[in-house]
Image (cartoon, rainbow, N blue to C red):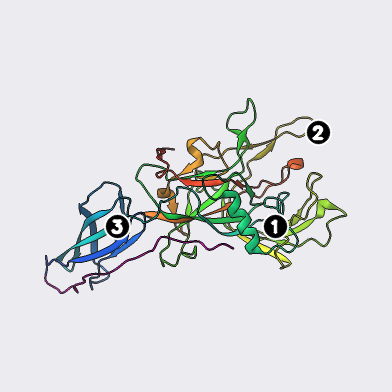
Amino acid sequence: MKKFRYPLYTLVLLTAVACDKDSDKQYPNSLRSISHTMVMVDAEMNLSDNATYIWSMEESPSQEYTLANTTLKTASFVAAEAGEYMLQLTAKDKGEVYSKSVTVEISATTSKLSPYIAKVYDFVPSVGQFTNEMPTYNDGDTKADIILEVEKNIAGEKSSGMVSLGGFGGYVIFGFDHTVRNIVGKRDIRVIGNAFYLPGVESSGSCEPGVIMVSYDANKNGEADDQWYEIAGSEYYNETTIKDYEITYFRPDSESGDLTKYIRWEDNQGGSGFKSKNNHHSQSYFPSWISDDKITFKGTLLPNNGVNTSSDPLYELWVLSKYGFGYADNELNKADDSAFDISWAVDSKGAKVDLAGVDFVRIHTGVNQECGDIGEVSTEVSGAYDLHLKKEVVDSAR
């Protein structure tokens, strides 16, 4: 696999003065970083657990910045323009007031940033009719080979391919060559899929929603191994949506025979059954580069969105309806709802989180439904990009 170069993440402490107990005392501090890179700005005050903190911007050379977690001990900051940004912290503890100014010196990145996907970190499709076809599996391919093929398909400005995530749980993880800023009131990232509408059917046709999760490189190692946050789309609070759903698929004993009982599955809701193989795709639906006899997927399960609208028992017309907002492959690519706002992110308990920006995106197929002759609901991804670097403005209204 080709090597990938990342912007140099630097967070250099120039001056740090420990906090004593003198109220209204200034504690100067300076940090250095580069544009479009997350900076964590810590109070570095030895106060009690009951202390309160308020961060604000005192002076800035540009309004192109995002300051988040402004009521926590550690704030997060991303700036798009070079210059010196002066942050002000006011802390209160046990009747005392403490203040601190922090200068964040931002230098311009030495390389031209791209708004598009820069790297694919992981790809594990679920079972499905396009598994081993999108991308194509060739005998002997390893997981690294497949990930490289996925990257060729969906990364960069001229990406023209597409990958299928298969049925529920199949996922892809990708990232950018910079931190995508979370701009208040604006959507931040657009995901390109292949959703379309049937003629004369409003907001319906082939919409195969994928659940989106985001993360930032908190440990600064350039890997997508930090905490994930889910984009709370329109179905997040739907009472039929299942959080922490888990399903296991078992490798088929044969690629022929009774294909209505092709791949056995079990879930953590007491369900079990078989996935079928259709007449349109004869290859194995189980990822061929995986040596294990079973694969397990976990994540939020959305309600079924496919309905057979035909009244003729000999003819099927499946319509897969669009969900409101916040999902991949759920809307026409130029429509507002193919883009999402980082501000919609929540933690594992459903609490909203305040993110200054994100470095990584994870998408998994959110629906577990078979739709007759057209097969399973399977999220497809063709690319993604930072709306702000593309100069596309999409309000976060929904």
**Residue 124, how many percent across, how many down?**
63, 59
Helix, strand or loop under label 3: strand
Q: Three-letter amino acid code at disc 2?
A: Pro
**Residue 84, how many percent across, how many down?**
22, 56
Main SS of the magenta part reads loop
Q: Is residue 350 above or below residue 186?
A: below
First reached walking from the N terminus: tag 1 or tag 3: 3
Q: Quadrant of residue 38?
A: bottom left
* Residue 297 falls left or right of residue 56: right
Q: Three-letter amino acid code at disc 3?
A: Ser
Crowd class of label 1 (few under 14; some 14 to 19; many from 20; radius 10 Å): few
Crowd class of label 2 (few under 14; some 14 to 19; many from 20; radius 10 Å): few
Real-space CA distance between mark 3 and mark 2, rounded to the nearest whole angstrom: 66 Å
Q: Is residue 142 above or below residue 19?
A: above
Q: Three-letter amino acid code at disc 1?
A: Gly
Query: Mark 1 — residue?
Result: 271
Query: Mark 2 — residue?
Result: 313
> Which mark is on residue 107?
3
Q: Residue at x 17, y 66 (%)?
A: 28
Please identify the quadrant where the N terminus is shown: bottom right
Real-space CA distance between mark 1 and mark 3, rounded to the nearest whole angstrom: 55 Å
Question: Is residue 11 one of those drawn in magenta?
Answer: yes
Do labels 1 and 3 touch, CB within 8 Å?
A: no
